[in-house]
Image (cartoon, rainbow, N blue to C red):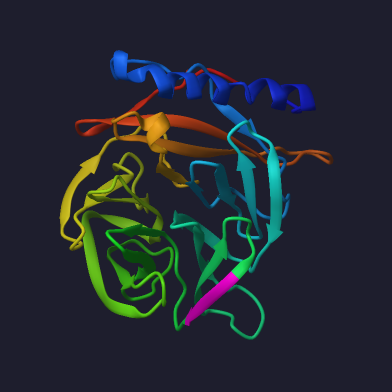
């Protein structure tokens, strides 16, 4: 399917509806459904799948390994910023965007970076690390950074992954700690987000069918697995309060890869809600 400007604008109507839902949900139950997902794009054809997502009250930020994109909540693209490859996950904190980078090219190849941008994607500061990095989030004023497998074994199945903790304002490192979610994974934590209390880690499981979301406490002790039908490895983040409306609701991204001479990747944004030990889809599953 080729996405036209009309398709894009039609899908953007989601956010007018979800804003209304966010304003009125206090009088409804958590069964309130969002009417449809949002389809956004078009992305860099050489950038691969979407790597991460974060949101503010004013914008949605999506990353590919080659670019960061800023959209408003009506789905309009506001800015596209080319970045160092491989840029991975990202998070929003106090008006700034924190990105996790595993450098694939140039003199810093095989190094890791924490790069910080302002809300308009202007570069602010960075910290170089001796190893590649992946997922990133901030909880209780501490930046949590995925730093790959403990033994840096890449795609080989492994149990332990390394997480570093940093001070967001200065990027000063606090400590590093290995974590074990009780299953074998490949690479490191692809995405990390928080509900304001716990940390949600998304991994590539070594075996099909393994739960893709692991919950850890702020001290990085393992809590439990959360079941979700579609892996959030392309990015997920907690919704702003006006859309979450008191519930643990998240934005989840899926890359819609296009193939052919004039085909480019797009992204589908759905909303999910934690209900006990499962994530429930709020947007219609069969919407194309």
Percent x, y of residue 268? 57, 33
Percent x, y of residue 14? 56, 22
Q: Is residue 284 left or right of residue 62?
A: left
> In the rendered image, which quarter contains the C terminus?
top right
Percent x, y of residue 247? 29, 30
Percent x, y of residue 70? 63, 48
Q: Is residue 285 visible?
A: no
Quadrant of the image occupied by residue 281: top left
Q: Is residue 242 left or right of residue 126?
A: left
Q: Is residue 135 visible?
A: yes
Q: Is residue 254 left or right of residue 225?
A: right
> In the rendered image, which quarter contains the N terminus?
top right
Q: Observer-nearest residue: 41 or 150?
A: 41
Q: Is residue 102 left or right of residue 142?
A: right
Residue at 42% across, 22% down: 23
Quadrant of the image occupied by residue 169: bottom left
Quadrant of the image occupied by residue 190: bottom left
Q: Majority secondary structure of the magenta segment?
A: strand
The magenta region covers 124-128
Residue at 69% across, 58% down: 81
Q: Observer-nearest residue: 198 or 256?
A: 198
Q: Observer-nearest residue: 89 or 205?
A: 89
| 222 is higher (above) or lower (below) than 173 | above
Q: Observer-nearest residue: 250 or 227?
A: 250
Residue at 44% across, 30% down: 271
| 132 is higher (above) or lower (below) than 208 | below
| 117 is higher (above) or lower (below) than 199 | below
Residue at 19% across, 31% down: 276
Outermost residue on the right side: it is 261
Residue 125 part of the magenta segment: yes
Residue 191 part of the magenta segment: no
């Amino acid at each position: 399917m080729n996405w036209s400007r009309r398709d894009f604008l039609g899908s953007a109507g989601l956010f007018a509806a979800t804003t209304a839902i966010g304003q009125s949900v206090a009088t409804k139950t958590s069964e309130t459904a969002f009417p449809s997902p949002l389809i956004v794009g078009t992305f860099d054809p050489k950038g691969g799948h979407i790597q991460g997502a974060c949101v503010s009250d004013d914008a949605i930020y999506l990353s590919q390994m080659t670019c960061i994109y800023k959209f408003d909540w009506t789905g309009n693209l506001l800015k596209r910023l080319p970045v160092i490859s491989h840029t991975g996950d990202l998070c929003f904190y106090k008006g700034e965007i924190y990105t996790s980078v595993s450098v694939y090219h140039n003199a810093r190849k095989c190094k890791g970076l924490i790069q910080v941008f302002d809300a308009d994607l202007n570069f602010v500061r960075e910290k170089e690390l001796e190893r590649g990095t992946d997922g990133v989030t901030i909880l209780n004023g501490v930046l949590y950074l995925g730093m790959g497998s403990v033994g840096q074994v890449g795609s080989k199945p492994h149990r332990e992954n390394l997480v570093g903790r940093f001070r967001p304002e200065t990027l000063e490192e606090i400590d590093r700690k290995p974590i074990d979610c009780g299953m074998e994974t490949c690479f490191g934590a692809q995405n990390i987000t928080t509900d304001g209390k716990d940390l949600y880690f998304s991994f590539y499981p070594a075996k099909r069918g393994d739960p893709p979301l692991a919950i850890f406490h702020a001290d990085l002790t393992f809590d439990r697995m959360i079941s979700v039908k579609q892996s959030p490895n392309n990015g997920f983040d907690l919704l702003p309060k006006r859309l979450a409306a008191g519930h643990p609701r998240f934005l989840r991204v899926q890359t819609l890869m296009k193939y052919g001479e004039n085909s480019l990747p797009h992204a589908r944004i759905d909303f999910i809600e934690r209900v006990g030990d499962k994530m429930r889809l709020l947007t219609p599953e069969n919407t194309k």
